[in-house]
Image (cartoon, rainbow, N blue to C red):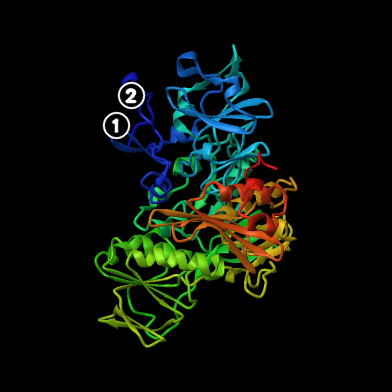
Amino acid sequence: MGGCFSKPKPVELKIEVVLPEKERGKEELSASGKGSPRAYQGNGTARHFHTEERLSTPHPYPSPQDCVEAAVCHVKDLENGQMREVELGWGKVLLVKDNGEFHALGHKCPHYGAPLVKGVLSRGRVRCPWHGACFNISTGDLEDFPGLDSLHKFQPLQVKIEKEKVYVRASKQALQLQRRTKVMAKCISPSAGYSSSTNVLIVGAAGLVCAETLRQEGFSDRIVLCTLDRHLPYDRPKLSKSLDTQPEQLALRPKEFFRAYGIEVLTEAQVVTVDVRTKKVVFKDGFKLEYSKLLLAPGSSPKTLSCKGKEVENVFTIRTPEDANRVVRLARGRNVVVVGAGFLGMEVAAYLTEKAHSVSVVELEETPFRRFLGERVGRALMKMFENNRVKFYMQTEVSELRGQEGKLKEVVLKSSKVVRADVCVVGIGAVPATGFLRQSGIGLDSRGFIPVNKMMQTNVPGVFAAGDAVTFPLAWRNNRKVNIPHWQMAHAQGRVAAQNMLAQEAEMSTVPYLWTAMFGKSLRYAGYGEGFDDVIIQGDLEELKFVAFYTKGDEVIAVASMNYDPIVSKVAEVLASGRAIRKREVETGDMSWLTGKGS
């Protein structure tokens, strides 16, 4: 891949360096790694960003020949609260009019390349229509997750109005990169790399955002991040959506990034004990490390089957890229049984239908996703799977795994049905990976979760926790203590933990947002629907073009949609603003309350 980014020659003026222009279905490409924002097509060959591109920010005052300027619209073309994608020849920008002022920003979400013009503008920020990331329109800064990078902002000097026309001036490099890594401090600690003490220790790759936030806030002392994985932090949600993606395609940051900003990563590093009195952790290989501040983001461990024959070969939980890659390799042309019809199981089943000879799903409930999405939505999704040749065995479980010469051959169900199987993938939930904390003095609840407050602090001063293994107070659900094992929440919690390590008194206020992709269709979800007592559906479930509102009593507590963008992002914005949505507002089918110009 050698060599760094060079300026395109004039003949290549029209080459798009971002995703292809057909917006629909591009997100699923991204989710499979084929159109991920880390790789782009140029002259027909996929190239990856190199360090210089990822790490350098375009010079704040680029030379005139590096810039492009164009009149993009008439002053009256945009009303307040409107957005438009405009072309500058070297790339597009998002033009926003808010409170009488024009702002020009990068037009694609740096996470998976969603067109932000289709997102939601509210309270001085634009929210991505696909996965809910939020960007400040005055600075371009990422304010809510997922994703790591911000947008380029073409400053007021670079948006001017002359003779009733709006002009935008932008650097060609900024137009092509479509992402901006925030300015970060570097590590100036003399002991970095070899001493047995660190200022901040982060346990778990989900703590990457904590490390980046510390550096963005000017923290220049030593940071050590340790992970059980053999890889640098990677895009975990892609694992089950795109099983044959290679580890290097999943990496969130290249190794040069960690080197440049002095974030030391210890891979395959298992913490076995934490001593909060002496502020010391011990690793499995005996290595000891002292810390001043500690973030625990150990994640969870997948539950496994405990039935007869559980030791046969080719039975998998999907935890690492190697697991995922191996499942695809073994499944080609063979019979696959997936146990568990939750997000992981259903994503795996969907992905393998084109590769395997047969795919069967075994589930205790009567419909997939029932607890999460309810009976009706679950049934509609089940039908989509059945139309794609997936066979369901519902309201039963596995009683035995039968092997031949040590390798899986059949899965026996409690209903006494015998299903042929060469590969079995188990997705029946997970438990917090907190066993190593039992004697530490750090509080755990009866299920093994780490309870934290709104500032992500545990019961021990200087010790914070984030991600799948925590319970925290959810502000807009009356501070109810909840566990939300979403990727986006781990990022938001890591950021809040970092801010509080620096005594900034930040509180967790993110609205949970998640997504799943199956058979090229995306389902988006925002809120916290646990304990819903009714589901109100607008649109057409059969056509998979619908929005489902989950209510408890008189209040909407969550929303899910397919082919109905940007409604989930809009609801997330309304909930984030602190306004409650009443059941009667969604029962009528009149969505005007949602399409207003923000709250």
Residue 433 pos. (x, y %): 56, 68
Residue 218, located in which quarter of the rendered image?
top right
Residue 491 pos. (x, y %): 58, 51
Residue 352, located in which quarter of the rendered image?
bottom left
Q: Which residue is mark 2?
A: 12
Query: Element type at marker 2?
Result: helix
Query: Element type at marker 1?
Result: loop
Q: Nearer the viewer, residue 565 or 578?
A: 565
**Do tag 2 and tag 1 residues touch (Cβ < 8 Å)?**
yes
Q: Nearer the viewer, residue 61 or 240?
A: 240
Q: Residue at x 58, y 48 (%)?
A: 569
Name the amino acid type tagged 2: Glu
Residue 483 pos. (x, y %): 63, 64
For residue 405, above or below residue 88: below
Q: Which residue is mark 1?
A: 43
Residue 520 pos. (x, y %): 39, 53
Name the amino acid type tagged 1: Asn
